[in-house]
């Protein structure tokens, strides 16, 4: 599955650069992931930080294709009865998204966009001293392919420089832990970003 995503991404970058223009953006912001409830306990992650970059190729004034990558980090805990029972360390994710976007109008000073796409989310393992004490140790979180939807606004300060606000949802519910005691985490990250855009 990983190789399939890599092939898609490389093919996208290798497409001839025809059309109106290309945008390169850098993003900073925050992210939110869901809480997983199971047998009276809850696996919860605090609001996290996000940084990212994107490349957007315009096929016309209203249609573009975007390739983006973000780095997310969340602090996690296991709760029992709404109270933190122990710390599970940081969850680090690297989502790569490819979306097809519809725009209000590329040459407008104020542009709105919206579009669906696919995502591949790579997650690091979870580990903490509390997990070691509980006899759990390192918890593997499976990387996998999901879907995404993205929307936002951008404002052109000059013909080549602009600012933007963006929100994207990623459908991502990975399995975690050993195969004989696997838990499906209902993460589904939502990323909120502010960014700078350069038009080439």
Image: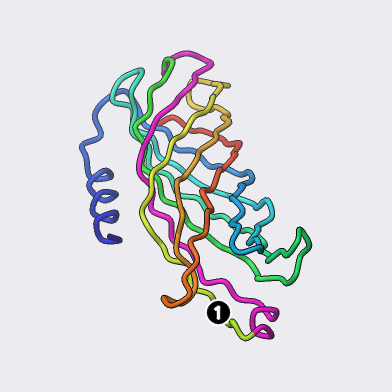
The foreground one among 135 and 40 is 40
Relative to 82, 58 lies left or right:
left
Please tell me which residue is depicted at 75% across the width and 70% down the height of the picture.
85
In the image, residue 23 lies at what x, y percent? Answer: 42, 33
The foreground one among 48 and 26 is 48
Please tell me which residue is depicted at 22% across the width and 47% down the height of the picture.
11
- Identify the element where label 1 is drawn: loop
Residue that protrudes farthest toward the front in the picture: 39
Magenta run includes residue 119: yes
Residue that protrudes farthest toward the right in the picture: 83
Relative to 13, 160 lies left or right:
right
Quadrant housing the N terminus? bottom left
The foreground one among 186 and 155 is 186
Quadrant housing the C terminus? top left
Please tell me which residue is depicted at 69% across the width and 55% down the height of the picture.
46
Q: Is residue 123 above or below residue 109?
A: below
Count of residue discs: 1
Relative to 180, 21 lies left or right:
left
The type of colouring in the image is rainbow
The quadrant in which residue 121 appears is: bottom left
Magenta run includes residue 65: no
In the image, residue 35 lies at what x, y percent? Answer: 61, 54
In the image, residue 141 lies at what x, y percent? Answer: 48, 67
Q: Is residue 48 above or below residue 107?
A: below
Question: Mark 1 Cα within 10 Å, few/some/many (few <14, many 20+)?
Answer: some
Name the residue carrying label 1. Answer: 138
Q: Is residue 171 above or below residue 4?
A: above
In the image, residue 58 lies at what x, y percent? Answer: 33, 27
The foreground one among 2 and 112 is 2
Tell me where the magenta segment starts and ends, as one range: 106-134
């Amino acid at each position: 599955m990983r190789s399939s995503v890599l092939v898609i991404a490389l093919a996208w970058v290798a497409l001839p650069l025809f059309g109106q223009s290309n945008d390169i953006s850098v993003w900073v912001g925050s992210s939110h992931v869901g809480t997983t409830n199971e047998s009276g306990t809850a696996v919860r992650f605090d609001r996290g930080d996000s940084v990212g970059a994107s490349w957007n190729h315009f096929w016309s004034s209203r249609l573009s294709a975007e390739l983006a990558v973000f780095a997310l980090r969340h602090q996690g805990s296991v709760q029992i009865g709404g109270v933190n029972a122990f710390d599970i360390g940081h969850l680090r994710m690297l989502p790569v998204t490819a979306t097809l976007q519809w725009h209000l109008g590329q040459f407008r000073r104020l542009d709105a966009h919206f579009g669906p796409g696919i995502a591949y989310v790579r997650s690091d393992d979870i580990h903490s001293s509390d997990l070691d004490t509980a006899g759990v140790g390192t918890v593997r979180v499976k990387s996998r392919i999901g879907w995404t939807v993205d929307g936002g606004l951008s404002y052109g300060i000059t013909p080549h420089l602009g600012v933007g606000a963006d929100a994207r949802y990623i459908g991502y519910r990975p399995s975690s832990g050993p195969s004989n005691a696997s838990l499906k985490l209902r993460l589904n990250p939502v990323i909120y970003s502010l960014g700078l855009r350069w038009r080439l």
